[in-house]
Every structure is written in C-alpha cells, then in structure tokens.
Image (spheres, rainbow, N blue to C red):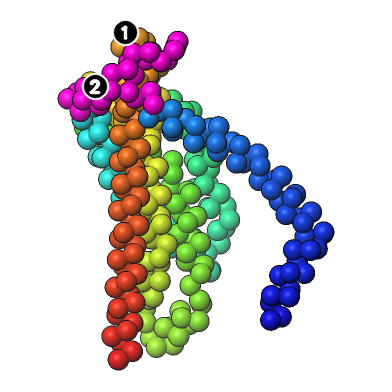
Amino acid sequence: MHNIDYKKKSKLNPHLKRNYIWAYIFILPQILYFLGASLYPIIMSYVYSFFDWAGVGPLEDFIGFDNYKELLEDPQFWGAFFNTLIYTIGFTFISTSVSLILALVLNEVNLKGKGFYRTIYFLPVVTTTAIVGIIMQNIFGIDGLVNQVLEKVNLISQPVPWLVDPVLAMIVLIVVGSWKSIGITMVYWLTGLQTIPNDLYEAAKIDGAGYWTTLRYITLPLLKPITAVIFFLAIISSMQVFDLVKTLTDGGPFYSTETLELYIYRYAFASELGGSRVGFASAAGVILGIFVFLVSIGFALLGWIAKRKGNALKGVNSL
C-alpha cells in the first residue's frame, strides 16, 4: 500500500515530470541519429537490393531477387566470404589469447609501471586504422623494415614478399589487425580480472596453491561470463573489417585478402569495375548483415544453453 501511494505521489510531482522531460530531450539526438544513420540505411539497403540501381536517379528497374542470384553464383563473392572467415578465426584467436596473457601480467599487484605499460598497449587502439595500414604497408614491403631487420640478423638471404604472396599477405593482415585491437580486448580482460575477489587468492595461497593452480581453478573459471562477451565482440568486429584491408593490401594479391566489406565497397563506389552497382552491393550487404545476425543468435543460444546447464548442475548439487 505504501508503494502504491508513493507511485501516485510521484506522478503528481511537477519536479519529477520536469526531470523526465529533460531526460527525453537529452536522449532525443541519439534517437534521431540512430533513426537517420542506422535504421534508415538498413531499411533502404533491403529496398535497393531488389533494384538494378547505380546510386543516382529514381528507383525504376525492379529486378526482384536477381541481385541475390547473381551474388550467390559469383566465385569472387564466395572468395571474399572465405577470406572473411579466415580473418575472423585468426583475428579472434590471436587478439583474445595474447590480450589475456597481457592482462594477467598487468593485473599483478607488485608489477611496477602498470599504468605506463597499459597505455603503451592501448595506443594502437586510438590510432587511426587507415594510418596503421599505410605504415604497415611500408614496414612489410619488399624494402621495408621487417626485411631489413631479418636480413641483418641473417635469418633470410633475400627479401620476403610479405604483401605479394597470398598466404603471407593474409597472415600479415591478421597479425596487424590483432595487434591493433589487443589493447581494447586487454581492457575487457582486466575488467573481468578485477571483479574476482582477492579473498579467493589469499585463501588459495594459504592452502599452498601455486600460480598455475590458482589460474586454472580460480581465475579462468571466474572469467567465463566475460569470456563469451569478449569472443562475441572480437568475432563481430573482425567480420566487418574494411579500412585496414583497404589501406594495407587493397584486397590483393589477386583478391586473396578481399573481405566482404571490401567486396561491397568495390561494387558500390569503386570505378574499376565499370560503374557503381549500388543495388548489387546492397544485396551483398544484406547477406553480410544476415550472417552477422545469425552469429549473434548463435552466441545468444550458446549462452542460454550454458546458463541452463549451470542451473541444472546447481539443482543436482543441492540434492
């Protein structure tokens, strides 16, 4: 009864009404931005995908699902799809594992200069990706710094074609992309590590547990909730890579590093293909969006299954 009276009183309070109005005013720009910059382009991408449209003029040439049919029959599209999967797997594995190791080291209480090291590892995150791609293109070039160093220490007898060989170019792309994002993933791991109570570590130390035992039975199990989130973010971001590929390899050599984002860009804006095909590119964007959505649903289902199993185990243990 007391709660009901409080709610009625709150509705009649002019001060609270003013607060609600100001709250809506402050979130209005974000809502308008979402509607204009996110929701509207997504909806129009679906519309454009059913037209043979070059991006200029009215939508007149309705072709139905012809863009999708042509897209699914295009070997270059499936090559870009396969390259995206390879990049996603390599990027996710390297960025998450290396960042976890760095987070474990930088989370040590007695480590001196932790703030400095965290800043150093985070700097690539705030560096413009296009600039990183241009710099790395020079570093991994035939006469670049990497080949010069390897030749000086007598590890190679002639320059390695890092960006000319298809396999090496993909490896370089994955390594550079992982290095660029390790800092932000490290912050995520540090956030998870700092939520673990120190009492658990102190109790384990009293019981005689060493570092590796503590890591295996305390740290890693308690990191499971944030691990799924980190892997999800890494996978989603890696499937939407564009600027690094464009500036570092431009999809080469021979489209061996072309991703879906770059494939869409070429047909929507690039002139080397003989003119823009915004309708066809929109169809490719729709398929990419559906793929990302399915991955998101898959992660949600895995999280739901894991949660149900955890609840089931708790119920069995309680018996």
**Residue at 71%, 70% in the rendered image:** 7
Relative image position of residue 26 (x, y in whole percent):
70, 45
Few, some or many C-alpha atoms within 10 Å of disc 2 (few <14, some 14-19, many ≥20)? Answer: some
Q: In screen coordinates, is 129 left or right of 283?
A: right
Q: In screen coordinates, is 104 left or right of 142?
A: right
Extreme-bottom residue of the structure: 319
Instruction: Reply yes or no: does residue 119 show up in magenta.
Output: no
Q: Majority secondary structure of the magenta segment? A: loop
Kind of residue sitting beneath label 1 = Gly
Residue bearing the label numbered 1:
274
Secondary structure beneath label 1: loop
- Between 274 and 194, the one lying in front of the other is 274
User: From the viewer's perspective, is the residue at label 2 or at label 1 nearer?
Assistant: 2
Write the start and end of the magenta stretch as one range: 47-75
Q: Using the image, tell me which numbered label, if any, was put on residue 12.
A: none
Relative image position of residue 263 (x, y in whole percent):
31, 25
Few, some or many C-alpha atoms within 10 Å of disc 1 (few <14, some 14-19, many ≥20)? Answer: few
Spatial distance from mark 2 to mark 1, Cα to Cα? 19 Å
Kind of residue sitting beneath label 2 = Asp
Up-down relation of residue 310 to residue 268 (above or below) = below
- Between 53 and 180, the one lying in front of the other is 53
**Residue at 33%, 13% in the rendered image:** 61
**Residue at 30%, 46% in the rendered image:** 294
Instruction: Reply yes or no: does residue 61 show up in magenta.
Output: yes
Give the number of marks. Answer: 2
Residue bearing the label numbered 2:
66
Tell me the quarter of the picture where residue 89 sits. top left
Up-down relation of residue 67 to residue 14 (above or below) = above
